[in-house]
Image: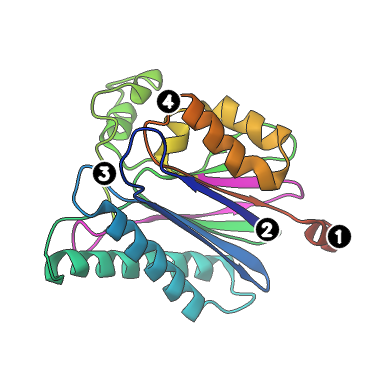
């Protein structure tokens, strides 16, 4: 697997509160996106602490060939460690203040992707035979309203409470994360992003960019189109795709 990254402040925000990382391993790639909570102080600090802590914890504990179930457990533990570090920085730092961030992470191998998410940064699967599927569930008020049948799917995008999170890293001493394992086929792609991307572009537009652009240009093209649509938030994108060597190993 190979990762292609892009991050931009957008056209409205005065500060970039997104942070992202990608780390290659012998048998896969770890990718992480964190989006600091704009309505709170120190959102950029929270996202930087979280992405660094999650990466460090995962790298220190991952072993080549680890079963997918154990990888999910490790991703969950990595998110928990990130939560503790952000929370401690908020409570015990030099200038104590409330801070928080989203976190979405994937460890992808040729045939399997293991995911973790907290908040509303997303992971998408783009199967080789077409289409796009949101893998993560947003931890937001509007998602809860939708699941209760109080609003429609279309209303989620414009609802007045669409930016309110019900889970975030660092807001309390403990946080619940979602994990899952997704099987991959040759030619499948994975996309991680902050809400600065999907808040400006439809899933169909995101898919069109991913399938019509060279992989290394996808983050740049996504960011450009999101900015062209208004760029109301910071924009982070990571595309994970199989490289030629991966395909050769599968054959």
* Mark 1, secondary structure of its residue: helix
Is-magenta flag for residue 46?
Answer: no
Q: Nearer the viewer, residue 35 or 16?
A: 16
First-in-chain label (1 vs 4): 4
**Spatial separation of the CA atoms under disc 1 and disc 4:** 41 Å
Q: In the figure, 125 relative to 75: above or below?
A: above
Q: Which mark is residue 248?
A: 1
The answer to whether residue 83 is visible is yes
**Residue at numbered disc 4:** 230
Location of mark 3 (residue): 38
Quarter occupied by the C terminus: bottom right
The answer for how far apart the CA atoms under marks 1 and 2 are is 14 Å
Rendered residue at 32%/38% (across/down):
13
Of the numbered discs in the image, which one, if any, rests on residue 2? Answer: 2
Highlighted magenta segment, given as a residue range: 170-192
Q: Is residue 229 left or right of residue 239?
A: left
Q: Quarter of the image holding residue 87?
A: bottom left
Distance from disc 4 to disc 2, alpha carbons, whole Å, reads 30 Å
Image location of residue 235, percent across then percent down: 45, 41
Q: Quadrant of the N terminus?
A: bottom right
For the residues bearing labels 1 and 2, Cβ distance under 8 angstroms: no
């Amino acid at each position: 697997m190979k990762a292609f990254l892009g991050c931009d402040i957008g056209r409205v925000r005065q500060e970039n509160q997104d942070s992202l990382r990608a780390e290659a391993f012998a048998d896969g790639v770890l990718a992480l996106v964190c989006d600091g909570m704009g309505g709170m102080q120190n959102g950029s600090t929270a996202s930087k602490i979280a992405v660094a802590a999650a990466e460090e914890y995962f790298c220190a504990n991952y072993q080549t060939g680890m079963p997918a179930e154990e990888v999910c457990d490790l991703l969950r533990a990595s998110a928990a460690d990130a939560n503790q570090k952000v929370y401690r920085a908020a409570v015990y730092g030099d200038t104590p203040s409330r801070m928080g961030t989203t976190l979405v992470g994937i460890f992808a191998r040729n045939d399997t992707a293991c995911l973790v998410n907290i908040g509303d940064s997303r992971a998408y699967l783009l199967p080789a035979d077409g289409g796009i599927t949101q893998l993560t569930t947003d931890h937001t008020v509007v998602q809860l309203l939708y699941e209760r049948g109080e609003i429609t799917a279309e209303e989620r995008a414009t609802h007045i409470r669409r930016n309110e999170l019900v889970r975030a890293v660092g807001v309390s001493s403990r946080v619940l994360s979602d994990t899952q394992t997704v099987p991959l086929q040759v030619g499948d792609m994975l996309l991680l992003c902050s809400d600065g991307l999907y808040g400006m572009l439809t899933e169909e537009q995101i898919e069109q960019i991913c399938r019509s652009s060279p992989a290394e240009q996808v983050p740049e093209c996504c960011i450009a189109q999101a900015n062209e649509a208004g760029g109301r938030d910071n924009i982070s994108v990571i595309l994970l795709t199989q490289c030629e060597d991966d395909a050769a190993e599968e054959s």
